[in-house]
Image: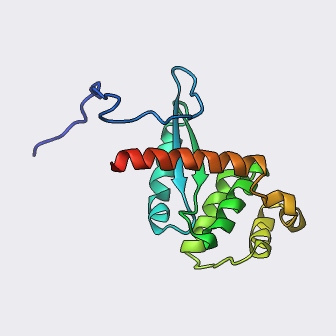
Amino acid sequence: MRRYTRKAAQPCNIRKGLHYFLIEGAPPVPEGSNEVVEVFSYMCSHCNTFEPYINSWAKRNAENVRFSRIPVVFGRKAWEIYARAFVTAQMMGLGDEAHAALMEAIWKDKVVMRSMQDLAEFYSKFGVDPKSLLQPQSLSPSTPGCARSSARSRLMASAQRLLLC
């Protein structure tokens, strides 16, 4: 029986302009650190399929990589409520547990949330007062988290256009 062993990682010759492009206007990343940003939507079936893989990867690389998520709507008005809910949940410190639970509720349990009231009730399971989520300022596009997420989404869209050319 032939045995296979994993070889030591070989250095790659990754070149700017060939394998990757710098994103104009992107926030600087400190020298020697790595950042991975997942651009996702709760309503995207591909994002749902990818979820366990990215979570596993992020846990294995927690010491070396700063991992974050940016919710996007891909121009679909119906998806906007979920993107805003993600940003609000992050701002309230709900984090990965609430994110995973919402993804599971949508795709495994087939729960459709059509209003902020529905999402407020969902997040109440994590100790959030539903009334605080329903405050108009909590989900305004001008809220710093929403604005930052929107700006980063535009940067990622620019990068995607470069890669598709």
Tell me what residue is drawn at x 59 percent, y 45 percent: 152
Can you name the residue that lies furthest to the top here? Answer: 31
Tell me what residue is drawn at x 83 percent, y 61 percent: 127
Query: On the picture, is 8 further left or further right than 112?
Result: left
Give residue 121's quadrant in the image: bottom right
On the image, the x and y values in percent for residue 133 come to: 83, 63
Q: In this view, does 84 lie above or below 26?
A: below
- Observer-nearest of 98 and 13: 13
Q: In this view, does 3 lie above or below 115?
A: above
On the image, the x and y values in percent for residue 15 come to: 31, 28
- Observer-nearest of 16 and 9: 16
On the image, the x and y values in percent for residue 132 come to: 88, 62
Tell me what residue is drawn at x 57 percent, y 69 percent: 76
Q: How many marks?
A: 0
Q: Which color mode does the image show?
A: rainbow
On the image, the x and y values in percent for residue 19 come to: 32, 35
Q: In this view, does 58 lie above or below 86?
A: above
